[in-house]
Amino acid sequence: MFGFKRRKRSGQCCRRPSPRTGKGCFLPKIAIAGSPNVGKSVLFNCLTGSYATVSNYPGTTVEVTRGRAVFGGCEYEVIDTPGAYSLLPVSEEERVTRDIFIDERPDVIVHVADSKNIERMLPLTLQLIETGIPVLLALNVIDEAEKLGINLDARYIEEQLGIPVAVTSGVTGRGITELKQRISNYARQCRVR
């Protein structure tokens, strides 16, 4: 539906030949996706630390932030994609996000969703799953949701969607260690398929 093709995955942990040249190596990619104002950039900083490169996506004025992270014994390139409500683009930001998924084929997409508004977030989750790229759902700002009396059953959501689900609060650091572990395990598991 979105023009995605499955990519054969390498069994290597951290590096594999570049698909464009067949030579050299590049890091496995973790793309952070989600609607605007859900805490994507905060989670990006939690995963990568303070080092990041911000540049415009080629041919656009849309900024894309890239960094590196090491967890689970592997180094990853982490991409903070522009905010998007859908993979059927109506804005330049959504088009850039979709193009990153098509052109760069990340190893895992971390969909950051606002726990307070989960019903509005899940349509994008389903679109991301349809791409065939492994998706991990991060239920972010869980501390704010709990203050409002919202209790989410992450295991139930995980069972229903068939993807890993992590509960996080980027501002307080809650769940970040688990998120890193789940990303690492999922990326490794998907590479050996």
Image (spheres, rainbow, N blue to C red):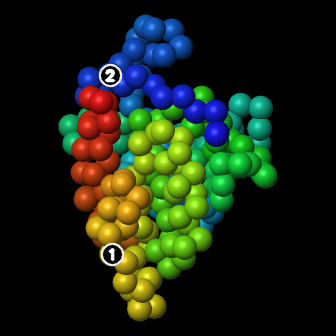
Q: Quadrant of the N terminus?
A: top right
Q: Quadrant of residue 51?
A: top left
Q: Quadrant of the C terminus?
A: top left
Q: Which residue is mark 2?
A: 10
Q: Report whether 52 appears left or right of 13.
A: right
Q: Residue at x 26, y 23 (%)?
A: 12
Q: Quadrant of residue 64?
A: top right
The type of residue carrying mark 1 is Asp
The correct choice, above or below, for 48 with respect to 151 in the image is above
Q: Report whether 185 appears left or right of 51.
A: left
Q: Position of residue 71 (x, y in %)?
A: 26, 44
Q: Which residue is mark 1?
A: 153
The correct choice, above or below, for 3 with respect to 117 in the image is above
* SS label for mark 2: loop
* Residue nearer the viewer, 32 or 157: 157
Q: Residue at x 51, y 73 (%)?
A: 118
Q: Report if the CB atoms under discs 2 and 1 are less than 8 Å apart.
A: no
The correct choice, above or below, for 149 with respect to 113 in the image is below
* Residue nearer the viewer, 51 or 105: 105
* SS label for mark 1: loop
Q: Residue at x 48, y 29 (%)?
A: 6
Q: Quadrant of residue 78?
A: top left
Q: Label 1: few (<14), some or many (≥20) within 10 Å?
A: few
Q: Position of residue 67 (x, y in %)?
A: 46, 41
Q: Report whether 20 appears left or right of 70.
A: right
